[in-house]
Amino acid sequence: MLPVCFARGFRSARRVLVHIALSFLVVAMALRGGGELVAQEPPSPASADGLQQERPPAAGGPKSDVGPYAIPRKKDEPPTPAPPERPKKIEGLPDYSIRVDVPLVEVPVTVTTKGGRFISTLQRENFRVYEDGVPQTISNFTVAQAPITAVLLTEFASTNYAFVEDALRASYSFANTLRQDDWVAVVSYDIRPQTLVDFTRDKGAVYGALNQLRVPGFAETNLFDALYDTLDRIDRIEGHKYVVLVSTGFDSFSKINLDQITRKIKSTHDLTIFAISVGWIARQRYETAGRTAPHGLGIPISRIDYLQADNQMQTFARLTGGRFYQPRFEAEYPEVFHDISGDIRNQYEISFHSTNSKLDGSYRKLKVDVIAPDGGPLRVRDQKGKDVRYQVIAREGYTAKHTVE
């Protein structure tokens, strides 16, 4: 064991050596390169919470996301493009443009012999179309044989048993001509229209609708109201539509008058009406006996009323390019609807862009002529070489669209 004095001297010498070593270390850190002394920057001021705040780099924000703020780097922005030059205004020219879309006018045309046989050998060059007397250029021409979209509108009221029987016979005859792809709706009317079946391709559903017509209700036959309601519904359907009207043509109590229903027919687009008058046999039987066929209890009617009813039905068909039939025997009904089916499925589809571009809602008259390729009158011959008379069936006009449509 060392003496106490020696131990104390040893500890004092050790403290001196440590102090000398620390001094040399400080001097070595302060010297660089050629022995120059580098001045140190003063320490940064402390933050309020006693922690030293790091100065952000000059080129941007801190490298980590723990700094108190970040200075975004400046990007090289592209130069702002100069605004386009406004076109020089021409004196007298309005500062707006007008665009007019002339709608396509479609005209179904049927050309048949006097016997009702469709003439299917005509070409585009054989047709001339006039609108208000102005020749039009045919843009599209096809021979159509396609499915139909039709409404069977039949009168079924408590009027006369012969009328009801004829109406049912005619309705079933029409149903027999339907094909698989046809769209058909069935509507009956007396004092008001009633939809028996909406548009369907199911032929059985059409027969089922007609089977509901067993006991007639009211004696009133409001033809104008029923036809107006039907046209109002089908006018929203795209494509060409047909109305097969089976009726006596007599209107007893409608709110719509003849002038209003006529305007409605003219304004309905892509429409053809085929009118079949019923009750002609009963009418002739009563007239032979010096009387008038009754139309219903308490509804007075005369022979003039029936003649006017026939004229109304003819007008409805003629305005739309359809045909009017007045069967006189029961056996004529299948033949009538065979002709109607031929007219509907075999026809010429002609369309043109009207030279009158005004969308003013005006009614414009149409005329379709059939000529020979050389411009002369067309001659149609039968198998024996004899000239055959023919007829051109097309709608008499159409109503142009209005600017608000």
Image (cartoon, helix red, strand yellow):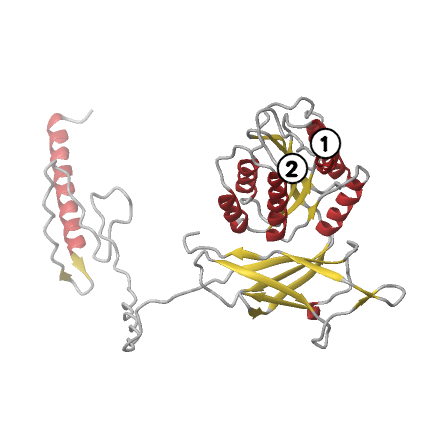
- Disc 2 versus disc 1: distance between alpha carbons? 13 Å
- x and y percentages locating residue 290 in the rendered image: 70, 34
Q: Residue, x 72% and y 74% (percent of image)?
A: 373
Q: Residue, x 77% and y 57% (percent of image)?
A: 114
**Left or right: residue 120 compared with residue 3:** right
Residue 241 versus residue 272: which sits nearer the camera? 272
Determine whether the residue tagged by mark 2 lies in a helix, strand or loop: loop
Assess disc 1: are there few (<14), some (14-19) or many (≥20) residues with their C-alpha within 10 Å of its C-alpha. Answer: many
Residue 147 marker? none
- x and y percentages locating residue 379 in the rendered image: 77, 69
Question: Disc 1 residue type?
Answer: Leu
Image: 163 above or below 274: above
- x and y percentages locating residue 319 in the rendered image: 59, 52
Which quadrant is home to the N terminus? Answer: top left
User: Which residue bears the numbered disc 1?
Assistant: 168
Question: Disc 2 residue type?
Answer: Thr
User: Which residue bears the numbered disc 2?
Assistant: 248
Q: Residue, x 21% and y 46% (percent of image)?
A: 69
Residue 288 versus residue 314: which sits nearer the camera? 288
**Left or right: residue 101 compared with residue 63:** right
Determine whether the residue tagged by mark 1 lies in a helix, strand or loop: helix
Q: Quadrant of residue 138?
A: bottom right
Circles 2, 1 touching at the beta carbon (< 8 Å): no
Image: 325 above or below 222: below
Residue 298 versus residue 199: which sits nearer the camera? 298
**Left or right: residue 391 compared with residue 361:** right
2 or 1: mark nearer the eye: 2
- x and y percentages locating residue 301 in the rendered image: 59, 33
Considering every residue shown, the one lying at the far right of the view is 384
